[in-house]
Image: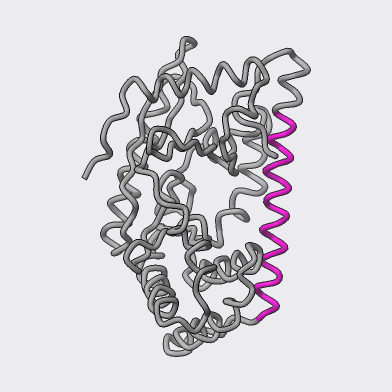
């Protein structure tokens, strides 16, 4: 299944984004900046704008995106249908938008849980399904970022939203994602250093099933779903025990929460540095600045 083409509308969106960035009128954009992409809602679609890439580099991302989807599908993970769209720029570089049909806000996992008690049978069913997807899918270099914003729950069946930022490692354990995307919000001269010093630490939790679930439990705590943590932790530890894995303890969740907050500070900090340096040089920002 393919996402219907936006055609000229997507080019007009990019034109509005670039004009707003150039003129400093970013409040009108109503985008949501993340660590990697900025999300725009447009014409009934969710459009994730990735950092601009140098000429000739978009094909590698498209191939990686496709491979990631295939690997997720083989692992039984249903990903929300999405497609990368390439917008050429006058200087030869490109901007990639990953486009998917917009999802009702109440179907995002965090909002969905907010409307249900931890004891609700639907919560138990959805959580058990997520555990099954994570423990069955995270292997052989395929990772999953299972935090709340990456799941929607139509018809009590969780679907994955994290395809725009592929989590794939080579047989040698090397991250396949281009550093100009992974750290595209940082100044160009800083990306290689970040890749050497922090890329492994930032992405390692996504490549071990138990760690993926610790990340999700910590995100529940961070996003105001504390009442769900203890009952879902008990359910998770029952699954871990049956698989001969050590139980997750509250101290681990608290530590992962601190790590996530530190990662947010790092990524926001390097993005703000890039914006500040470009302003100093009287150049427009390349993306929506973090809040």
Where does residue 166 sit, x and y in percent of width and height?
A: 43, 47
Residue at screen point 47% across, 70% down:
209
Q: Main secondary structure of the magenta part?
A: helix
Picture quadrant of residue 86: top left
**As drawn, 291 above or below 144:** above
Residue at screen point 40% across, 37% down:
98
Could you tell whether 255 is left or right of 62 in the image?
right
Q: Pick the residue in front: 103 or 140.
A: 103
What span is in magenta? 250-274
**As drawn, 48 above or below 168:** above
Could you tell whether 33 is left or right of 133 in the image?
right
Q: Would residue 169 be seen by someone viewing this image from the given angle?
A: no
Residue at screen point 55% across, 81% down:
233
Picture quadrant of residue 257: bottom right
* Residue 241 is a magenta residue: no
Q: Quadrant of the C terminus?
A: top right
Where does residue 145 sit, x and y in percent of width and height?
A: 49, 58
Q: Residue furthest left?
A: 1
Picture quadrant of residue 258: bottom right
Q: Residue furthest top?
A: 90
Q: Quadrant of the N terminus?
A: top left
Could you tell whether 214 is left or right of 187 in the image?
left
Could you tell whether 46 is left or right of 281 in the image?
left
Q: Pick the residue in front: 232 or 64.
A: 232
Q: Pick the residue in front: 59 or 107.
A: 107
**As drawn, 272 above or below 195:** above
Q: Residue furthest right?
A: 280
**As drawn, 248 above or below 78:** below
Residue at screen point 45% across, 15% down:
89
Question: Which colour style is shown?
Answer: one colour
């Amino acid at each position: 299944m393919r996402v219907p083409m936006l055609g000229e509308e997507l080019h007009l969106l990019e034109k509005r984004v670039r004009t707003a960035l150039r003129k400093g009128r970013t409040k009108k954009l109503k985008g949501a900046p993340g660590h990697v992409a900025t999300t725009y809602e447009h014409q009934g679609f969710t459009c994730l704008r990735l950092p601009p890439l140098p000429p000739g580099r978009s094909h590698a991302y498209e191939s990686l995106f496709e491979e990631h989807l295939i690997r997720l599908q083989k692992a039984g993970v249903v990903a929300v249908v999405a497609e990368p769209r390439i917008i050429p720029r006058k200087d030869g570089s490109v901007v990639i938008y990953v486009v998917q049909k917009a999802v009702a806000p109440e179907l995002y996992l965090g909002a969905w849980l907010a409307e249900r008690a931890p004891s609700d049978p639907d919560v138990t069913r959805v959580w058990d399904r997520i555990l099954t997807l994570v423990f069955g899918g995270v292997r052989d270099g395929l990772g999953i970022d299972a935090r709340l914003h990456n799941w929607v729950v139509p018809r009590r069946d969780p679907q994955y939203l994290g395809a725009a930022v592929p989590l794939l490692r080579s047989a040698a354990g090397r991250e396949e994602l281009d550093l100009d995307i992974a750290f595209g919000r940082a100044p160009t001269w800083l990306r290689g250093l970040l890749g050497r010093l922090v890329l492994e630490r930032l992405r390692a939790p996504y490549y071990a099933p138990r760690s993926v679930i610790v990340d999700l439990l910590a995100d529940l705590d961070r996003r105001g779903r504390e009442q769900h943590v203890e009952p879902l932790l008990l359910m998770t530890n029952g699954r871990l025990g049956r698989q001969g894995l050590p139980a997750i303890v509250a101290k681990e969740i608290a530590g992962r929460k601190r790590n996530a907050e530190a990662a947010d500070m790092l990524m926001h900090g390097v993005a703000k540095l890039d914006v500040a340096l470009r302003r100093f040089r009287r150049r427009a920002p390349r993306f929506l600045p973090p809040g």
